[in-house]
Structure formats: structure tokens, C-alpha cells
Image (cartoon, helix red, strand yellow):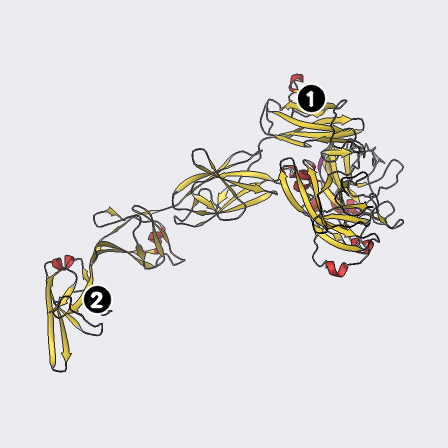
Amino acid sequence: MKKILYSLFGLLFALTGCMQDNLLQLEPVAPENGEVTVKFTASIPEFKTVQTRGNGGVNDLWLLVFDQNLNFLVREKAILENQTDTGGEFTVTLPASGYKRYIHFVSNYDWTGFNDLDMLGYNVNAIMSLIITQNPGFWATVELPNGINTTCFTGPGAPTIELLRNQAKISVTETADNFELLGFTIHKAPEKGTIAPFNPTTATFEVGAITEPVGVTLLNAQAGEVNMNEKFLFERKNKNAEEITTVIVQGNYNGNTYFYKIDLINDQKVRYDIERNYHYNVDITNVSKEGYTNFSDALAGASHNNTALDPIIEKYPMLSDGTRKLQVERTLVVITEPNKTFNVWYKFFPDIVNNPTTVNNDGVLVTIMSNEGALSSAPADFSFDNATGIITAKSAATVPTVPVQAQIKVEKGELVRIIRVVLRPPFSFNPVTINNLNPAALLAQQGFNSTLRFFIPDDFPDELFPLPVNIYTQGLYAAEAGLQLFVDPGGIIRYVYTATATGLQDVEFKTNQSYLAETVKLEADYFSDATVNYTRPVGNISYGSNTPVPADATVTASVGSLNMVALGKYTYNSGGAASSTPVTVTFDEWISNGYSKRYAIATTVGDLENYVTLNLPMTYHLFNGTLRYGSGWSGTPIPASATVTLNPVIPNSIFAHPTDGYYTYDVPASANMNTSVTFTYVRSGFFGSTTYTLTRTLNNLVTNYNLRLQ
């Protein structure tokens, strides 16, 4: 079917409609417990193309079953199984029945508020009319005369399932010598649409019946929406509407910028209805007059359809006329390298009714429609083989600074597919940052949050999503679900992130303690490799005679937290304290069970945040051990409540026995270790007091730290 727009003045446009695609076939298996399991087999690229396109793919699929009287019975969700690179299967379990059944397939609809029990017994017209959406969706319906059983989708006369989009697509291209297309938008586009097309005359759901929601609002075009992207809109009865849907085109004509308003009319000046699943392509081939000088005038003014319009059928990788099918592997090939040989397959199915899987490419013709410098001009660099269905081509010898295109036409009779080849410089991930910096400075501790951010430009084609991005990092580990981890030869760690849309991409990682610095690398098809560096600033820390503090040592800071990350290396987190705040850094060196040496230094938060070099001087001898009195093998613990005196009292020393039978004794490093200290405990009893003493030098206390006073 073709839809043709004609001109009035001198703008040449072409607009076409395409046939529905994305055929899904069903294969039932044996029923269990009165139910039938049905499998939907979808082949790629149709399935994959639908799933990944920006206008919405088959994200979910629900089946609504109606009885022989078209009354609602049940709603079941199909489950995706066995997905491969070449296809996938949906599986759903339905109630078996020998009575006639009607099934409606609905994809990408928000079922919030739909209560199956409340809908039980409702007529199909009442239920399907409720399914209105502002999002892209798909629909199909079949009649099963013999009900749902193991042969209902495999026996003679079994139906085929062809999902129908609920939106039309409008695109604008130009080939005029005196006109440069800057963008376009749609004026008076419906804000929402129906999932299923309904014919009120026959009271049936029919492909080709244009169905608008009641009271739908038409959206005015906005100047900020003018761009080169394809536009998707819901269908409407535009032919006799009081407010019509038009295309607003912006372009440079003879050096000046104008706006043009395009009415969708045919050669008889009859306006087209806008029908779902059709692609309306406006091709500007010649411009002969000025348009409106500002956007608002174009909205309010008359249409400029003053040119002839040439129809061009353009759709997705598969096109069928109901009996035959022509399919190509893909309709877009992006090349970023010179002299790059690539292949694209094609298949022609001469009889999809009786032999749906039989391919016969005899008579298929493949030609280069246009070439702006994307393909090599050497005849030997382009070929096709109907026996294998393979097109072989080579990109040009030089990659241009701006994208250039070529079009390869694959045709058999009236069925035509266009493969667009784009040769361009690689896309860029830049800016690439970690925590918004490149290079980044990460806290050198385990588990520090590190957000890798990169960019996928807005002109990256929707057809190329989902896009796997390889991320090479040895010092970061994934902190979010969805990243795939691989260990490549040589022990190289690689994560794979899957991008699904343009714009900023944030990938959450955390630091480990193995790497203090590295270069993180990003790789993906169609993109230049990108890198981001990070360091983990650390300070040097030693004690005594510049001996590095061990990596496993416990070093404390009186404000914030100080962590050892390697031998003689520390990192610091102030916790938000002011830079002038005093901080004491302390490290206790264990010598034996009862003796340690304390090293400490006074500094500030600011110095530590700048990772000043620290050499901690010794400040104290730390003694600890048992504290007992009396004779016998081990004596009796001195109570914590008792008083123990020391003579002499060494200045700035601290003696304590907070628990029964144990003591701590901190002696300044400046003390003379030959000093003898007498420990005295006076025990009061019923018959009087008894004094217990013990005298030891500090040097002796280093090895004889357990005290028993006698």
C-alpha cells in the first residue's frame, strides 16, 4: 500500500506507508492438567529490532482470552525463554477448551488498575476500549475456531500472529540543491492512542481501522522540539478533521532560515488519515520559495504543500505483501574504519503461506542507490550472491570528518529494503570521569564509592542499542547489579556494561586496597577507546628512626580516621572537621606481652588532608601486667578499689589498676630506665594493717612486668 502527498507550489516531498512487520509464530505443546502451553517463536532481526528501537520494543506480552461469545475469561503473561542471537521464544499457559476462543495479544501496556476478577465476563469491546496509552505498544488478535488445544497453532488453517504497532512514524529527508534541512516537528499530534484498532461499523477489531480515544488532546508543536529525529505519533482521522496534523519543517533556503508547514495530502488534494504502523517519509527534493520567518507564524499560517510528492516505501528489516517476504539482516550499518569489508545477509521467502521457512533468492537484485563517499567506488569492492544471500561491500579509503552515507537497495518485484551505510569518525565517550574528575583522586581505603561516568552522544543511532561497553579496571570492583565480569588472558579483569540509551551513563564501582593508581579503559564498537586515570593520594608515615609503620599496624587519629594502606603509607579522612583542628596521631609498637612503645605526633586536619610526611617520635613506655600481693605460688589480686603508691613518682607518668589484679603504667620516654620504683600496697585488717612492697628498675620492668608485692 502507498500513501502519496502532492505539492502546491514548489516543495517536493515524498511520503509513504509501510506494511506491518514482526511476525511471531506459535508452537503449542501438549496440555497439562487442562491447560495448554504455547510457545511464540520470534526470529531476529525482527524481534531484536523491535526490542531495542527508541520507539519502544516488545518488553512484555500479555494474552487476553475471550470465549465464544467474546466475553473475557483470563489474562496471562507470556514468559521469554531460550533467547539466542538469532531468536527467542515466549511461553504462556492457557486454559484448554474445545469451544471457539478469541485471543488478543497486548504488549507494553501498564496494567495498573486492571482487575481480572472484576473484568470476568465483560465483552471484548468493553475491555479493549479501556486499553489507552501514551506509550508505544503492540497488538494482535486471532480466532481459534476449535478452541485452545495442542494443535490449535499447528494444524491446518492455523493463524499467524502479526503484531501491529499503535503508532505511525514520520521522517523528513532532503535532496534539494538549494535547501538545507535543519529539523522538523509535528503540530497537533495526539497525546495518546488506542492499543487495538476497532471498526465500529462491523463491531470488530480490524487492521486498518483508525481508532482514536474519546476526547484526545492534540499537542501543539514546540520550537524546542525541532530536530532531525524521527517522530512517532498515534493514529487519527486526519482527513476530515477541523484541526489537522501537520509537519513543521525548518531549513535554510538560499542562505536564509525559514519554517514550512506541510499538510499531508495526496495528488487529489485529499488529506491523509494517519494510520498506525505506517512510516510517512517527507522527502524534500526541490524548494522554490521562502517559508515563514518565525515558528509561530508557521503554526498559524497556511500549508506550503506546493511541490510534487514521490512515495518511497521505507520500513523495518522485514517487508511482506501477505504472500511473500523480503528480509535483510539490518537496515543500518555504521562503519568507523577505512577500507573495512563488511557483510549483510538478505532472504526472500516466495511463499510464506504454505512454506514460511523456504528461502529462494532467485531474481533478487542488489544495487547501490546512492553513495556520498561511504563506500569504495571500485566495482570489485561490491558484490552480492543470491546463492548465499550475502552482500559484500567495503568502506571508502578515507574516513571523513563528518558522517557520509550510502544506500544499498535490495529488491524483488515490488518488495524493497534499503540498507543505509554510514561512514563516520568513531563516536566519543568523552567526557569520561570518576567522581566527576579526570584524573580523579580516590580515598585509598577499601570500599570507597567511585562513580565512572561517560557519555553516549545524542546522534548515536537507536538501532545500535543495546550497546555493550567493555570497562577494564584492576583496582575497582562493581557496586551495582547488571555488570558482567570476565577475566581475560593474563588475568586482566573486564566488566561489561550494557547501555540502552543516549546521554550520561553512570556506573557504580568501589575501590579495593590493591591498587593505588591506574588507568581505567573503555572500549565499544563504533567508539574511540577512552581512558580515565585515578590516583589514591597517600602520605608517608614512620616512627622512631624513620622506620616505616607496618601496613597491618593500627594507627589512631584523635580526629577523623587514619588508615594504613601499605608499608609506610597512610590515608586520612577528616570526617568534615575544619583544617585547623588539632590532631594527635598515635602508634603503639608491641614489644612483648607486657611492654609496648608509644609513638605519637601532634598535627592538624589540614596537614593530614595534604598527606604530610609523618615521623612519629617515641613518647611513652607502656607497661601492663598482673598486680598481686602476699606469699604463695601466685599471690592474691590487689582489688581495683585499693590504693597502690609509687616512689618515686616519675613526672607525667600514669599508673592505674582499673580491674582487680591488673595494672597499666605509662612512663614518658624521657625517663631514666635505670630508675628504681617501689610499689606499695597497705592492706588493712581486723588485727591491723600489713604493708606489701616491691622494687624494680624500669629496665627490669620491661621483661618482668608481672608484679607481686610482699
Residue assigned mark 2: 662
Nearest to the observer: residue 44 or residue 566 = 44
Q: Residue 489's quadrant in the figure?
A: top left
Q: Residue furthest bottom?
A: 686
In this orientation, does residue 405 appear?
A: yes
Residue sitting at 31 percent across and 58 percent down? 583
Q: Residue beneath label 1, please?
A: 384
Q: Is residue 229 visible?
A: no
Real-space CA distance between mark 2 and mark 1, rounded to the nearest whole angstrom:
93 Å
- Bounds of the magenta span? 181-187
Q: Give the amino acid at mark 1.
A: Phe
Which picture quadrant has residue 318? Answer: top right
Secondary structure under tag 2 reads strand
Task: Judge whether 671 appears above or below 403 on screen.
Answer: below
Q: Position of residue 438 (x, y in %)?
A: 46, 42
Q: Position of residue 264 (x, y in %)?
A: 82, 40
**Residue drawn where x is 71% and y is 59% of the image:** 113
